[in-house]
Each structure stands twice: as structure tokens, then as C-alpha cells.
Image (cartoon, helix red, strand yellow):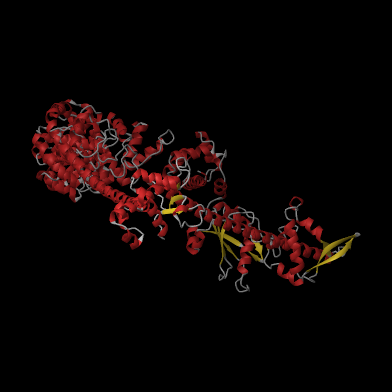
């Protein structure tokens, strides 16, 4: 088993559809709220941003940090979650 | 510039320049990219300071930074120094972005639009595909340098124009020109800067361009002086141009005496398939004419068409054409010298030399390149420049600038010169062209004659055979020799000779000959179908007599003797005498009724026709025979197949009957109410569908017969059932205990140990290959084919999944491993779900995924398998326990 969280596995197991941004791994209530304030209210919007940044890890992490103040672990979780989702479904 | 003041596009381009390909810059991504930009700049600074001192300050001089670091530093330096403020950035960007530099063309960074720099024929506005930072960065930097030069020309067209650098109408040229104008020495400085980025070798170094390279501050005039060595080469290039195909083909013909630049242009333009617009026609024409063949590899930015200035440009252009080197050399030298002579080298020389310098500095050098350069002076190096240029990005980067200038300057004056000096140029390239064509023709005619030769031989052979046939036919037909021959060789024997005098003999023989001929003709005509004229083959006695009278009166006397002799001779002379009875031979002249020829003479056509028909008929007969044989064969095959089919069906039916009877008897054992026999019609009706009964009647009959004769366990008897007599079958095999034992395999699936969920299985199937553990214990297995049972078990368990293509039971594994390959990951996922955690034969089975390549290494035979396997029997015996159980989860030993 990998060291991914349950949230990660859940998110990655199926198309995200209309899941809230808090379904992303690493994004909890607080961060989720911040993202929603910025306009990223759904997971797919964050996915959009991820793709716009060309799936670049560093950029995405920076962006996440800037946007909602995620720490390194949260950034990493979110990034790997999105990346794996993209690998499976994109 | 302050990061905050950058617009999105600027940010974008900056990032690109620094070697990083950004995604779209939006309000969300902007801050991220700004940070990135800062970071990159810092990195760059570090690198720059390491590599070259002056770069950051944007000074014009940059020492040779051929090394990779040069790229970065060059970019920085050029960026900072050469870039005109503000507006140019966008201009640059615009220039840069379309200019896709193919991987090959590092040098290609010359403005995409401007493509004037025909670096190579496949240069195009393709997006730069290189992702490697260093490479990209260096390229970018070079490109940016180039682009710096581009905007330059835009600014001040005038000054350079006077020099005769006809940039023509093309904007890139204009740009170049302007740029050059502004830049003047800074341009040289840029060039110098460019050199270092040219990581590729510096071919020019040897030839003395190195001084150009270093002499960044040289005035254009000085360049002039050094130009001379180049001009010959450029001239050569001119020669080379004529043969290559150019995209701006219309220009090919024109030659310009001083067309070195033109050639270069041509080369550049031709090279650059995409860059049609930039060069004005005069350029192309001049350059093109001589060097059509150079087109391919023109690395040269050398679009500059101005003749004098093009000398250097040409060289640069020539560099691109390694492949045509030899040829071009030959041609080039011819043309070159011609051109040189015609050319006048005004100021352009400076440009040329400047360009040359750049080339020298920046071009990487395969030795050919160097040789070319060296040979410049010696008039044969031009060709060599060829391909080397292609890889010399830096050279090009500098070249475009110069070229552009040249172009712009040339525009006006070139035309004038072009006209005058064009004429002498024309013949020279045409000569080359002609030579080329001649060569082709020679080769073509050579092949041509070979082709002809074979044709001639073939026709000769055919003719020979035809003649042979004709002669044969003629021989057969004619038969009769000349009269004289006949008269000499007559069949009548010596007696004839003795009894008559010579003239009489002659007369008699002639008579007979004539008769014979006449008869033959008649017979021939008759045979050929001309039934109108001659109703029958023979002519009557009197007719023959009359005919001969017509011929000559003296025949009359000898008519009878001739007839007698005919009768007397036993041989066949070609005349048959027919009496009243056709069968008996004529012994007396008086008996002759009619005469007939035995050697009919038919016309050639007729004969041919008959022969032809004969052949055809025989052929048809043969074909018919073959056809009949084939028909017979097919029929037999069909019958045989049908037989097989029938037998198979019969056996199948027999088996079913046996099964029915057996099961019935088992049921009887349990249920004492049933009779231990079954009426045959009942069995039939239960086995065969009503609609098939008619069809299967025959099969059924055969089966019944078979059973009665060959099956010992079934007894046919007559029983009275409910008052009616029936033929019944009784199953007579007692006590199937042993049978039952063997029928039930010990290996069965016994349910699942745990439900499969996320925690204990991978969420999605990873590979199409599975390794199943704990299916068996190799120590305990007995017999030969237990692995087959294992395979069967797996197939049956996954019977709903039609995707298993290969199963391998590892007989020697202690863990009881079975390897399975499926059609796809999805199938393997399903199989995984079906197998993982199940109990089989009292053991808990586990499954894991294997890598496909490892699987193929282990089982290479699995590479070819792609048909799904199915369990061999429909009975699914291994699942029997699961079926019988009420709940599938009721497995023993489940904790």
C-alpha cells in the first residue's frame, strides 16, 4: 500500500464530477474555505488551475501556497492527488 | 525591468527566454510566474557572472562563450544590452514566437517571419520543441540576439541602404537593415556576442575570420578589406545555386554578377521553405540562378542578396550545404569565378566580412566547414560550407542581421546591377543545368537502350518462332514440288522409264501432275468449306478429261496411258481413282468414275484456321477433362466431410443419451418410484428440440443403432409402459460410486474469505498480469495433469471474464503459484476480484499484479496469446460446491 491517505484514494478512484474542493487531498476545511473565497469552489476549478500551470509541481505548489496558504505537506498531497487523478482520467 | 511592470506577454516572453516554457499567464498564475522569473533571473545572474564578465552589463563584447554557459549569458547580455527598449520586446516576441526552431536549427532562430535566414530547407515556423533548458535557453538567447537585430533595421533604413544592401521589400530585411543601421558597431558587438553562443565549432577561425570575430568594433569599412577572401567563395556559391531547387523558383534564372549575396539569399530563401515573403525577388533571382542545388542545406542566414555584400553571406549560406558539397564545389567554382569577375564589391564587403566574421565566430565547424573557409580564397571552398552551417546556430543568428542589412541596402542598387550582370550569369548556370540534364539523359538513355535491347530480343524470338511455324505449315501444305521435280521423281518405277521416250514421259507426267494439282485444288477448296463451287471432292472422269484437254491437247493421247499407269502403280501419287463402288479399288480404266485427290491443297489461311481450330478443340477437351476430375474430387471431399459431420453428431447424441440414462438411473437409485429404464422415444424427445426432430432423425437412428451394438452399459429391451409397448433403455451399470468419486474433483472453490474493498486491494487494476498464490501444494499433488485441473479451476472461477489469454501453473513453486495474463488491465481487475481472498481446496488464495514485461520475460509464449481461454467443460465442477451451497460465503475455516 502506498502512503496515500484515504482521501487521496477516494478522490483518485473516480471522476471528480462536482466534488467540492475540500475533497482534494490536503485541502481541509480551512484551506477549502480560502480557496472558495478566491473563486475555486469546486475541485475541477483547482484542476483547471493545475492544468493551466501545465501540471508543474513547483508552480502548482507555489500557487497553492499563495492562494490559500497551504503548507508543504498539504501542497504535496494536493499536487499528488491531482496528478494521479489526471493520470487516471485525463 | 521591474517585475510588476511587465505585462503578461512580457512576462511570458521573459520566461521563455530564460528557458522555461510557461503556461498561460492569467491573473491567477501571474504571481507564480513572477516568482519564477525572479528565481530564474537569479540563477542566470549566477551563471552569467561565472561565464562571462561583461554580459550582464550588456556590453557588446562577449568573449567566446562557446561553452554552454554562453547560452545563458548571451541571452542575458543580449537581452540587456542589445534589446531596444520596450517596444522591441514585443517585436521580439512576435518574432520569436512563430519562429519555431526545429531541433536541428539552433541557428535558425533567425526571425521566423524573416526566415530570410535560410538555415536549412526544413526550417519553419515550428514551435521550438526543445525543452532542455540549457539548449533552449541558449537558443533563445541567440534568438533574442537575432531578434534584436531584426528590430534594428526597422528603425533606420536609410543609412545602410546606401551601401547597397538591398533589403528589398521584405520586412525582415528591412528590419535587419534598420537594425544594422542603428547598431553599427553595437551590432558588431552583438555579433561578437553571438559568436560565443555558437557552441558549435568555429570553422572560420582558421581562415582568418577569427579576427573578425574578435574585432567587434570594427567599422564596416574594415570589413571590406577582409572581404576579398570571401568573395570567391561567394561566387562559387552563386554557381551552386543554379541547380538546386528553390522555393522561390521564379528567380532561378536570374544571375547577378555580383550575386554572391544573391546566391546567399537564394540559398537562404530556398532553404527556408517557409520564408517566402521576406526576400524580394531580385535577391532570389540573383542568388538562385547559380545555386539551385545549394538550396537544401543552406544554413545561411545569407539572405542578403546584394552582390558584394553577399560574398560573405554566401559563404555562410554555403555552409549549410554539406551534402552538395562536392557537386557544388565543381559548379560553384565555375560560377563563382564568373560571378566574381562580374561582381563589384562595394561597401557590401564590409557587411560580408562582418557576416563572415560572425560565421567564423559562431559557426561550429565540421572540418568541411573549415575547409570551405580556407578555400574561400582558393575558390573552391564554397561548396564545403554546406551542412556545417546547419548546425551553427550562432553564425546564423549573426548572419541574419547582416543579411538583412544587406538586403535592404541592396534593394535599390541590385536591380540595376542585376540586369546588367545577369546575362553572363545566366549562361553559366544554364550550363550547369544542362550538364545536369545531360547527365540524366545519358543515364536515362543508357537505361533506355537496355530496355530496348530486351524488347528487341523478345521480338526476335517471337518472330523466329512464327516464321518457323509458317514454314512448317507451308511445307505441309505444298507437298508437291515443282513440276520438274515431280517429273523426275515419279512413282511408276523403271518400267515407266523404259517404255516411253522422254518426251512422252514428260507429257504423261505433266499430265498427271496437272491432274493432280487440279484435283488437289478442288479437294482443298471443298475441304475448306467452299461447298458452293465444288459440291464434292472428286471430279468425274469426264470432267478431269475435259480439264486436261483445256490444258493441252497432247494430253489426250496419253490420258488413257496415264490412267493405266496410275492404276498400275501401287503407291499413292495423290490421285485416287474411284470406281462405281467407292470401297473397291479400280483395276481398269473403264471402271473409273471419278478422281479424287488424296493430298488436298488448301490455302494457307484455311490451313491455319483448321490447325487453330484443332488446337482449340483439343484444348477444350483437355480442360473439360480436368474440370470433370476436379468436380469429382470436390464432390468426394464434400461427401467425406459430410460423413464426418454426421458421425460427430451421432457420437454427440450417443453421449447425451448416456448422460441422460445415467442421471436417470442415479435418480432412480434415490427415488424408488421411478422405473430404471427410459423409453427411447422419450429420450429422443427430451434431447432433441421439436423443430430439429426431422433433421436429426437420421442422426438419431444411427445413435440408437450404435448404442444397441456398441454400448454395453445400456440394454435395449421392450417394456410395457402404461399399456403400451415401448422400446426402452435400461442403464445397467451398477453402483457408480467409483464413477462419482472420479467425477467430483477434489479441487473446488469454497467461497470468499473477505470482501474486497479499498483497504485490501488496489483501487484499480494495474497491469494485465496476475500472480496467484497458494493454489496448490506441489508436494501433495499426484498424477500427471493436476495442473490442468488448476487451470480449469481458475478459468471456471473467472468464467464470466472473457479476458484470460494465458495461464501458467508453476509446478515447482512451493507457494503454489499460478501466473495469469489477461487481455487488459480491466480484465485482470475483474479476475483479481474474483480470485483474491477465495478459498480453494482448503487454501486461501491471494493475488497480486505483475509487471507485463516481467511476465513476458518469464513466459515469452504469452506474447502471442490473445484469444480468451474458456473452461473446457460446461460443468464447472470446481464451482460445484459454490453452486450447491446456499450461501456463497459459507466456507469452512473462515475466521
Q: Is residue B886 above or below residue B108?
A: below
Q: Is residue B894 above or below residue B294?
A: below
The answer to whether A55 appears left or right of B681 in the picture is left
Quarter occupied by the C terminus of chain B: bottom right
Q: Which of the 4 image quadrants contains residue B811?
A: bottom right
Residue B547 x/y as whole percent: 39, 44
Residue B164 x/y as whole percent: 14, 29
Residue B138 x/y as whole percent: 28, 43
Frontmost residue, B474 versus B524: B524
Q: Which of the 4 image quadrants contains residue B705?
A: bottom right
Whether residue B729 is visible here, answered yes or no, is: yes
The answer to whether B501 appears left or right of B636 in the picture is left
Residue furthest out toward the front? B557
Q: Is residue B681 above or below residue B256?
A: below
For the point 46% across and 58% down, the residue is B587
Quarter occupied by the N terminus of chain B: top left
Frontmost residue, B311 versus A52: B311
User: What is the number of callouts on the image?
Assistant: 0
The answer to whether B641 appears left or right of B851 in the picture is right
Whether residue B258 is visible here, answered yes or no, is: no
Frontmost residue, B580 versus B17: B580
Q: Which of the 4 image quadrants contains residue B846?
A: bottom right
The answer to whether B593 appears left or right of B105 in the picture is right
Residue B796 x/y as whole percent: 65, 59
For the point 33% across and 62% down, the residue is B494
Amino acid at each position: 500500500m502506498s502512503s496515500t491517505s484515504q482521501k487521496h484514494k477516494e478522490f483518485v478512484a473516480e471522476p471528480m464530477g462536482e466534488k467540492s474542493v475540500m475533497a482534494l487531498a490536503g485541502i481541509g476545511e480551512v484551506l477549502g474555505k480560502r480557496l472558495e473565497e478566491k473563486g475555486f469552489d469546486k475541485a475541477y476549478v483547482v484542476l483547471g488551475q493545475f492544468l493551466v500551470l501545465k501540471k508543474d509541481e513547483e508552480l502548482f505548489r507555489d500557487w497553492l501556497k499563495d492562494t490559500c496558504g497551504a503548507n508543504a505537506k498539504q501542497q504535496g498531497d494536493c499536487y499528488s492527488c491531482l496528478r494521479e487523478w489526471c493520470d487516471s482520467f485525463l | 525591468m521591474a517585475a510588476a511592470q511587465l505585462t503578461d506577454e512580457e512576462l511570458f516572453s521573459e520566461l521563455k527566454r530564460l528557458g522555461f516554457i510557461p503556461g498561460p499567464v492569467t491573473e491567477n498564475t501571474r504571481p507564480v510566474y513572477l516568482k519564477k522569473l525572479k528565481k530564474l533571473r537569479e540563477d542566470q545572474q549566477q551563471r552569467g557572472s561565472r561565464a562571462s564578465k561583461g554580459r550582464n552589463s550588456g556590453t557588446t563584447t562577449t568573449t567566446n562563450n562557446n561553452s554552454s554557459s554562453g547560452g545563458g549569458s548571451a541571452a542575458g547580455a543580449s537581452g540587456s544590452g542589445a534589446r531596444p527598449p520596450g517596444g522591441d520586446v514585443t517585436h521580439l516576441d512576435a518574432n520569436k514566437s512563430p519562429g519555431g526552431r526545429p531541433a536541428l536549427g539552433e541557428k535558425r532562430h533567425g526571425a521566423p517571419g524573416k526566415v530570410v535566414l535560410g538555415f536549412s530547407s526544413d526550417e519553419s515556423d515550428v514551435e521550438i520543441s526543445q525543452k532542455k533548458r540549457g539548449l533552449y535557453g541558449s537558443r533563445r538567447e541567440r534568438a533574442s540576439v537575432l531578434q534584436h537585430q531584426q528590430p534594428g533595421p526597422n528603425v533606420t533604413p536609410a543609412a545602410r541602404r546606401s551601401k547597397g544592401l538591398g533589403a528589398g521589400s521584405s520586412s525582415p530585411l528591412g528590419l535587419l537593415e534598420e537594425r544594422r543601421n542603428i547598431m553599427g558597431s553595437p551590432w558588431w558587438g552583438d555579433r561578437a556576442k553571438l559568436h560565443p553562443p555558437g557552441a558549435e565549432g568555429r570553422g572560420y577561425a582558421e581562415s582568418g575570420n577569427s579576427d573578425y570575430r574578435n574585432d567587434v568594433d570594427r567599422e564596416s569599412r574594415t570589413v571590406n578589406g577582409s572581404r576579398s577572401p570571401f568573395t570567391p567563395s561567394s561566387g562559387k556559391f552563386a554557381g551552386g545555386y543554379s541547380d538546386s531547387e528553390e522555393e522561390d523558383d521564379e528567380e532561378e534564372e536570374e544571375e547577378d554578377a555580383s550575386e554572391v549575396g544573391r546566391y546567399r539569399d537564394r540559398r537562404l530563401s530556398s532553404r527556408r521553405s517557409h520564408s517566402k515573403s521576406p526576400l524580394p525577388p531580385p535577391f532570389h533571382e540573383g542568388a538562385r540562378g547559380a545555386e539551385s542545388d545549394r538550396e537544401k542545406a543552406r544554413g545561411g542566414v545569407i539572405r542578403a542578396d546584394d552582390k558584394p555584400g553577399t560574398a560573405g553571406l554566401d559563404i555562410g549560406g554555403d555552409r549549410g550545404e554539406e551534402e552538395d558539397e562536392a557537386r557544388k564545389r565543381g559548379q560553384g567554382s565555375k560560377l563563382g569565378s564568373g560571378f566574381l569577375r562580374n561582381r563589384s564589391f562595394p561597401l557590401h564587403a564590409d557587411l560580408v566580412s562582418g557576416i563572415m566574421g560572425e560565421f567564423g565566430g559562431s559557426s561550429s565547424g565540421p572540418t568541411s566547414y573549415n575547409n570551405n573557409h580556407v578555400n574561400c580564397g582558393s575558390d573552391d571552398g564554397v561548396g564545403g560550407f554546406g551542412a556545417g552551417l546547419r548546425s551553427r546556430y550562432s553564425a546564423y543568428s549573426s548572419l541574419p542581421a547582416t543579411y538583412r542589412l544587406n538586403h535592404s541596402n541592396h534593394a535599390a542598387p541590385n536591380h540595376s546591377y542585376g540586369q546588367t550582370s545577369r546575362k553572363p550569369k545566366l549562361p553559366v548556370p544554364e550550363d550547369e543545368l544542362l550538364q545536369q540534364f545531360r547527365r540524366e539523359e545519358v543515364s536515362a538513355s543508357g537505361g533506355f537502350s537496355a530496355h530496348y535491347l530486351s524488347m528487341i530480343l523478345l521480338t526476335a524470338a517471337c518472330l523466329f518462332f512464327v516464321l518457323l511455324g509458317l514454314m512448317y505449315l507451308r511445307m505441309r501444305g505444298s507437298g508437291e514440288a515443282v513440276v520438274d521435280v515431280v517429273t523426275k521423281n515419279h512413282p511408276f518405277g523403271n518400267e515407266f522409264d523404259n517404255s516411253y521416250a522422254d518426251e512422252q514421259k514428260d507429257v504423261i507426267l505433266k499430265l498427271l501432275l496437272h491432274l493432280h494439282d487440279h484435283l488437289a485444288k478442288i479437294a482443298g477448296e471443298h475441304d475448306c468449306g467452299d461447298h458452293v463451287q465444288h459440291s464434292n471432292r472428286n471430279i468425274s472422269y469426264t470432267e478431269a478429261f475435259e480439264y486436261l484437254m483445256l490444258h493441252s491437247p497432247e494430253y489426250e493421247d496419253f490420258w488413257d496411258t496415264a490412267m493405266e499407269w496410275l492404276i498400275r502403280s501401287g503407291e499413292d501419287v495423290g490421285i485416287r481413282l474411284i470406281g462405281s463402288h467407292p470401297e473397291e479399288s479400280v483395276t481398269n480404266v473403264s471402271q473409273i468414275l471419278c478422281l479424287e485427290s488424296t493430298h488436298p491443297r488448301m490455302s494457307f489461311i484455311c490451313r491455319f484456321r483448321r490447325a487453330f481450330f484443332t488446337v482449340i478443340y483439343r484444348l477444350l477437351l483437355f480442360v473439360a477433362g480436368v474440370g470433370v476430375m476436379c468436380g469429382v474430387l470436390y464432390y468426394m471431399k464434400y461427401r467425406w466431410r459430410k460423413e464426418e459431420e454426421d458421425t460427430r453428431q451421432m457420437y454427440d447424441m450417443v453421449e447425451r443419451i448416456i448422460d441422460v440414462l445415467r442421471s436417470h438411473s442415479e435418480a432412480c437409485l434415490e427415488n424408488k418410484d421411478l422405473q430404471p429404464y427410459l423409453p427411447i422415444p422419450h429420450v429422443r424427445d427430451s434431447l432433441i428440440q421439436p423443430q430439429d426432430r426431422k433433421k436429426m432423425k437420421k442422426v438419431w437412428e444411427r445413435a440408437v443403432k450404435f448404442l444397441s451394438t456398441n454400448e454395453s452399459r445400456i440394454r435395449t429391451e421392450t417394456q410395457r409402459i402404461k399399456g403400451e409397448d415401448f422400446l426402452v433403455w435400461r442403464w445397467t451399470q451398477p453402483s457408480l460410486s467409483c464413477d462419482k468419486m472420479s467425477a467430483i474433483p477434489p479441487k473446488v472453490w469454497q467461497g470468499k474469505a473477505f470482501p474486497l474493498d479499498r483497504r485490501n486491494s488496489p483501487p484499480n487494476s494495474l497491469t494485465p498480469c496476475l500472480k496467484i498464490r497458494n493454489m496448490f501444494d506441489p508436494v501433495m499433488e499426484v498424477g500427471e495433469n493436476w495442473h490442468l485441473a488448476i487451470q480449469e479451476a481458475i478459468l471456471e472461477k473467472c468464467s464470466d471474464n472473457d479476458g484470460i489469454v494465458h495461464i501458467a501453473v508453476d509446478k515447482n513453486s512451493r507457494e503454489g503459484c499460478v501466473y495469469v495474463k489477461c487481455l487488459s488491465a480491466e480484465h485482470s481487475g475483474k479476475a483479481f476480484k474474483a480470485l483474491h481472498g477465495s478459498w480453494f481446496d482448503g487454501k486461501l488464495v491471494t493475488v497480486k499484479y505483475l509487471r507485463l514485461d516481467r511476465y513476458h520475460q518469464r513466459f515469452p509464449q504469452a506474447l502471442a496469446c490473445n484469444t480468451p481461454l474458456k473452461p473446457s467443460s460446461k460443468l464447472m465442477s470446481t464451482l460445484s460446491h459454490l453452486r450447491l451451497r446456499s450461501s456463497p460465503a459459507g466456507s469452512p475455516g473462515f475466521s
